[in-house]
């Protein structure tokens, strides 16, 4: 199965069907993936039934102005952190009045890595009325592979959430 395939077997299709069946409206807040998650969602016909839109906030300034991430959070924890992705998801959910928001921020590479945050370090945030969750993943690829791995992981996270009913 190819994750970005728009067939009925793809994660994107399965997630879309679950959201459509439950009447859930989704938004994305993306940094390192640059809109790849939103692009893959919209590869599915009629995804506007459940996908309201996405916000790509790559720079700190965009995270602050578009997603209401605090400068204090960015200075204290950095863009690639649990705290930042949760604020990103909260901001996107509020901005677009969605039921569910997923966010991602990571170090795609080849540069930008730090000893405590090497290239491939990626955080995801998921926010709904049922709670907030953050997930850390570490990918080992080149820049484009890490972006693809991050988008794939976002769909796995969404699928797990939707299959467990948000618990």
Image (cartoon, rainbow, N blue to C red):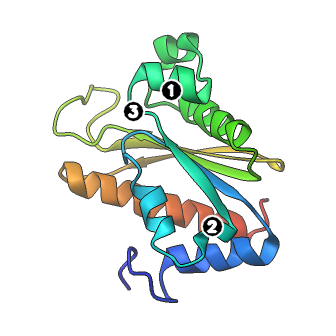
Q: Which residue is mark 1?
A: 63
Q: Earlier in the sequence, mark 3 or mark 1?
A: 3
The nearer-to-camera label among 1 and 2 is 2
Tell me residue 33's x, y (percent). 37, 48
Q: Examine the image and state in which quarter residue 50 appears.
A: bottom right
Q: Which residue is mark 2?
A: 48
Asked if residue 167 is positioned above or below residue 162 in the image, the reply reads above
Instruction: From the viewer's perspective, tell me whether residue 103 is left or right of residue 151.
Output: right
Label 1 sits on a secondary structure element that is: helix
Label 2 sits on a secondary structure element that is: helix
Label at residue 110: none
Say if mark 1 contacts mark 2, CB within 8 Å. Answer: no
Distance in Å between CA atoms under marks 1 and 2? 24 Å
The quadrant of the image that shows the N terminus is bottom left
Tell me residue 113's x, y (percent). 25, 30
The nearer-to-camera label among 2 and 3 is 2
Label at residue 58: 3
Asked if residue 93 is positioned above or below residue 8 in the image, the reply reads above
Say if mark 3 contacts mark 1, CB within 8 Å. Answer: no
The quadrant of the image that shows the C terminus is bottom right
Distance in Å between CA atoms under marks 3 and 1? 7 Å
Tell me residue 98's x, y (percent). 74, 50
Are there few (<14), some (14-19), or many (20+) residues within 10 Å of tag 1? many
Distance in Å between CA atoms under marks 2 and 3? 24 Å
- The answer to whether residue 28 is visible is yes
Judged from this view, the residue extending furthest toward the bottom is 8
Label 3 sits on a secondary structure element that is: loop
Q: Earlier in the sequence, mark 2 or mark 3?
A: 2
Residue at image position (65%, 33%) is 91
Asked if residue 148 is positioned above or below residue 96 in the image, the reply reads below
Tell me residue 90's x, y (percent). 68, 36
Q: Examine the image and state in which quarter residue 161 appears.
A: bottom right
């Amino acid at each position: 199965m190819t994750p970005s395939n728009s067939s009925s077997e793809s994660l994107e299709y399965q997630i879309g069907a679950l959201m459509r069946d439950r009447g859930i409206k989704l938004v994305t807040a993306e940094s390192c993936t640059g809109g790849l998650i939103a692009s893959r969602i919209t590869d599915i016909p009629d995804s506007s039934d459940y996908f309201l839109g996405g916000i790509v906030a790559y720079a700190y300034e965009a995270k602050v102005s578009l997603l209401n991430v605090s400068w204090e959070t960015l200075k204290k924890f950095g863009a690639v952190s649990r705290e930042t992705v949760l604020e990103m998801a909260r901001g996107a959910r509020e901005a677009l009045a969605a039921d569910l928001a997923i966010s991602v921020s990571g170090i795609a590479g080849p540069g930008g890595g730090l000893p405590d945050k090497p290239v491939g370090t990626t955080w995801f945030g998921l926010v709904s009325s049922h709670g907030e969750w953050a997930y850390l993943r570490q990918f080992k690829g080149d820049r484009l592979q890490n972006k693809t791995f991050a988008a794939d992981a976002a769909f796995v996270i969404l699928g797990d959430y939707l299959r467990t009913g948000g618990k």
